[in-house]
């Protein structure tokens, strides 16, 4: 019997509703420990940003203490047994991960490998009983990625991912820096904290933990040029809505995260990539110009190589 060809993932209202109630309790210690910076510095043709773009998409599907092990449910054998250092096994199609993370389909395995080299992920592609033997990739994540019990944490909300914001960000660097700034924000829930502060304001609390661009370079692993561009992306207002982060203070700055209360319509997200590129270009024209120049330069180099081969 011939198996049906895999279908591409499409954004839909049901997933937006389902994932809006979920979040990833990201461990803020990932930043001062240098783990996020090390991910960005991973060598490879696609750079380390692929793994950071994938990380919250993977992490929202499994977590420490989760009762359901996807591999056990599917009847998949020969995977490592449960361990307190790892979450239960989970699975998501490469097409789904690539679409939500805003990366190329061919980059998904690269991201898995980068995370695995840092002992943050284990993965295996094995035959799956419920898929009639079709091979499926299962993964589990290090529990160190998640906050410890009683620890403050930086929630990465599912609405950010499945509402289309994550994929609409124009670069991996912007997604990577989002995780860094979210972890550095000392105010994880302004509504809750605003009622319990003894003196001072939330802005004053953020100012006490303000960071310079030099520290942000070190914490993120980004070069100064890439950092400045990514900061510009995250602090640019979106249509008629606030930016993802509000920058305040002098230098050093504090960065207040804005939780988007809206999402991109699935019909738009599932439309042609041309429409998405044009929307990004209107929102972040400087980034679009740079990416366009780099794309033309790569095409020119390819043409030169083809001509050199024909001459030889």
Image (cartoon, helix red, strand yellow):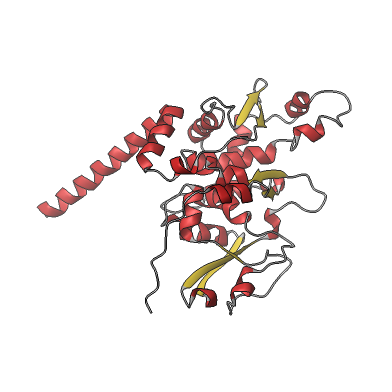
Instruction: Give the farthest residue toward the right.
Output: 198
Front residue of 38 and 56: 56
Q: Is residue 275 left or right of residue 55?
A: left
Residue 45 point in image, percent of width and height: 41, 52
Reply above or below: 49 against 291: below
Reply above or below: 274 against 150: above
Kindly identify the residue that appears in the image at 46 percent across and 28 percent down.
283
Residue 4 point in image, percent of width and height: 39, 69
In the picture, the quarter occupied by the N terminus is bottom left
Residue 172 point in image, percent of width and height: 49, 43
Kindly identify the residue that appears in the image at 65 percent across and 45 percent down.
156
Instruction: Give the farthest residue toward the top.
Output: 250
**Residue 106 in view of the camera:** yes
Front residue of 142 and 262: 262
Front residue of 288 and 66: 66
Instruction: Give the farthest residue toward the left.
Output: 311
Reply above or below: 252 against 37: above
Residue 270 point in image, percent of width and height: 43, 46
Q: Tag count in the figure? A: 0
Kindly identify the residue that appears in the image at 85 percent across and 30 percent down.
195
């Amino acid at each position: 019997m011939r198996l049906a060809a895999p279908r591409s993932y499409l954004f839909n209202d049901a997933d937006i509703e389902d994932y809006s109630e979920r979040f990833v309790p990201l461990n803020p210690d990932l930043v001062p420990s240098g783990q996020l910076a090390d991910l960005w510095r991973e060598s490879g043709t696609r750079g380390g940003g692929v793994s950071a773009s994938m990380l919250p998409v993977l992490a929202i599907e499994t977590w420490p203490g989760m009762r359901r092990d996807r591999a056990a449910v599917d009847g998949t054998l020969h995977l490592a047994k449960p361990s307190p250092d790892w979450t239960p096994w989970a699975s998501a199609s490469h097409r789904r991960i690539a679409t939500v993370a805003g990366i190329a389909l061919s980059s998904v395995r690269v991201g898995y490998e980068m995370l695995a080299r840092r002992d943050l992920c284990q993965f295996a592609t094995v035959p799956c009983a419920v898929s009639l033997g079709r091979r499926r990739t299962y993964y589990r994540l290090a529990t160190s990625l998640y906050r410890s019990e009683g620890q403050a944490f930086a929630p990465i909300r599912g609405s950010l991912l499945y509402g289309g914001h994550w994929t609409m960000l124009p670069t991996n660097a912007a997604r990577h820096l989002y995780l860094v700034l979210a972890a550095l924000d000392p105010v994880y829930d302004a509504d809750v904290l605003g009622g319990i502060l003894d003196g001072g304001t939330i802005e004053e609390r953020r100012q006490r933990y303000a960071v310079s661009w030099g520290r942000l370079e070190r914490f993120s692993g980004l070069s100064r040029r890439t950092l400045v561009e990514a900061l510009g992306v995250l602090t640019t207002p979106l249509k008629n809505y606030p930016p993802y982060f509000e920058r305040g203070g002098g230098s050093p700055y504090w960065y207040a995260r804005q939780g988007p209360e809206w999402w991109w319509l699935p019909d738009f997200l599932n439309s042609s990539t041309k429409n998405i590129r044009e929307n990004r270009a209107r929102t972040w024209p400087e980034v679009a110009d740079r990416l366009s120049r780099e794309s033309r330069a790569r095409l020119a180099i390819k043409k030169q190589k083809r001509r050199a081969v024909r001459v030889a």
